[in-house]
Image (tube, rainbow, N blue to C red):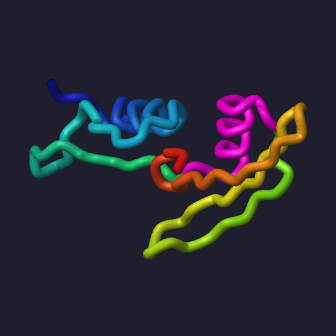
Amino acid sequence: MRVGPAASVILWVCAVSTGAGAVRAASPRPGGEPMVMTSAEVSMDQAVRMVEQRFHARVVKAQTEQDNGHTVYVMRLLNDSGKVWTVRVDAASGSVQ
C-alpha cells in the first residue's frame, strides 16, 4: 500500500500523539524499507502522574539521575497513612523499578 506525503505526516502525528513506544509507520521510505520511529522519553510530569495513580500516593520529591547512560527519575512518595518510600522510573520506557 502506498500513501502520499500528506498521509505520512498524518500517520506520524497520530503515532506521536498516542505516546506509543516504537511505531512502525504504514508508509515506506523512498527506498521501500519501512520507517521506524521511537517516541520521546517519558517526561517527568508524565512519570509523576503515572506513579501517583499506580501507588495511590503523592510524589513529594522528584529528581533526575543518570544510571549507566540511562535517564532515571527518582521519586519519593507519601501515602495517606504516612508511609514514605522511593521508586525509580526509567525515562525511556516508563517502567517502574
Q: Position of residue 8 (x, y in %)?
A: 34, 36
Furthest-left residue in view?
32
Measured as percent of width and height from the top left, residue 79 is found at 83, 36
Q: Nearer the viewer, residue 45 or 29?
A: 45
Instruction: Say whether residue 39 is left or right of residue 54.
Output: left
Magenta residues (range): 42-57
- Residue 49 counted in the magenta span: yes
Name the foreground residue: 64 vs 43: 64
Residue shown at 57% from the left, 49% from the top: 42
Quarter where residue 46 is shown: top right
> Which residue, as the protein is rendered here, is positioned at the far top?
1
* For residue 27, above or below residue 31: above
88 over 33 or under it: above or below:
below
Residue placed at 44% from the left, 75% from the top? 68
> How many numbered marks, from 0 up?
0
Which part of the image, by quadrant, shows the N terminus? top left
**Vertical arrangement, residue 74 with respect to residue 34, above or below:** below
Q: Residue at x 74, y 50 (%)?
A: 85
Return the x and y of residue 91 as percentages of the image width and height. Answer: 54, 55
Between 24 and 3, which is closer to the camera in this rendering?
Answer: 24
Answer above or below: position of 20 versus 41: above
Which secondary structure dominates the residues rendered in magenta? helix
Q: Is residue 45 magenta?
A: yes
Q: Residue at x 67, y 39 (%)?
A: 51
Q: Position of residue 5 (x, y in %)?
A: 33, 38
